[in-house]
Image (spheres, rainbow, N blue to C red):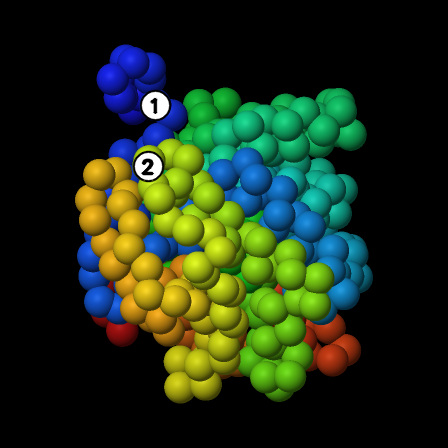
Amino acid sequence: MLKPEGEDGLRSLTDPAFRADVLAGLERRPRAIPARWFYDRRGSELFEAITDLPEYYPTRTETAILETICPTLRDLVGSGRAVVEFGSGSSTKTPVVLSCVDPCAYVPIDISGDFLRESSRVLAARFPDLPVLPFEADFLKPLTLPAAVAEQPKLGFFPGSTIGNMTPAMACDLLRAMRESLGQGAMLLIGMDRIKDERVLVPAYDDAAGVTAAFNRNLIERINRELDGTMPLDAFRHRAIWNDDRARIEMHLEAVRDIAFTVDGRAFAMAAGETIHTENSHKYGPRDARILLRTGGWTPVAEWTDPDGLFAVYLAEAQAERVAP
């Protein structure tokens, strides 16, 4: 919702949920801000740059898996489904899937509206006979999809191991919300990153070129721009660590000196070494992934991985409602 902001009466484009999450996140201990707020236009562009980095294996590995399984996927999914992509970004892997399953429509869903519309135009030009229906929304909750696909069988597409950004409890809630959004008879094609050596994991989130650091620090720039923040950018450094107990990479913004700043008129202070936790990327073993899917209301149908076992893609179908074990 847009509303007048500031003495000049200009309308602010700030999402009130962004304001609420940032203020609450800076006040809690330990401090944490949800990763979904990375993705303003600049954040989305930086993430796309990350996917091309030599250290960042998930994108190229998942794309190779999708290309390899295309004939099998076509047999399992069939044709005529509406493909609904959650958190579509630039939709770089989407053409592989659309070419495989012969869909009746494509519905990309993303929180970054400008980026969504631009990528949708590119995809529509590549598939001129396919209805492309961009949907700007936060997919973390059940959605009412466009009427044009309401009665069509659906294939949800959730690549990139984005499910790993949520805690396991949140991931289960999201999978249930997807099941509700997609409806009875739906299928879900989802990518999940595998647990592996820390020497492979950490560089993927702390690259030599500093692109991931810029992506993390862009959150500070967004806070300063949209919430009248005075957070000194040079007072924070990017940190990526492997938390083995929780099987996840954590990204933090660490204060390199004692600082005081304001956000939306509220005063905050951080001591040197204190951090703002900005992202998790949980990794799943094969059994963990299948349990997660079943808990979220999906029955695994097929599982594929690369030769090195770095990444996995799962196809699942919506579970029937059960009244007994």
Q: Residue at x 66, y 67 (%)?
A: 207
Q: Is residue 23 visible?
A: yes
Query: For mark 1, what is the residue?
Result: 12
Type of amino acid under label 2: Leu
Residue 277 x, y percent position in the rendering: 37, 64
Q: Which mark is residue 227?
A: 2
- Mark earlier in primary sequence (2, 1): 1
State left or right for residue 289 relative to residue 130: left
Q: Is residue 157 above or below residue 281?
A: above
Residue located at (34% from left, 41% from top): 229
For this orientation, the residue located farthest to the top is 9
Asked whether residue 142 is in view, the answer is no
**Residue nearest the observer in this picture, 263 or 289:** 263
Q: Judging from the image, what secondary structure is the residue with disc 1 in?
A: strand
Tell me residue 42's x, y (percent): 57, 40
**Number of marks in the rendered image:** 2
- Residue 33 rendering spot, x and y as whole percentages: 34, 55
Regarding mark 2 in the picture, which secondary structure is present there?
loop
Instruction: Name the quadrant containing residue 94.
Output: top right
Q: Nearer the viewer, residue 121 or 77?
A: 121
Q: Which percent across, then down, holds residue 188?
A: 52, 53
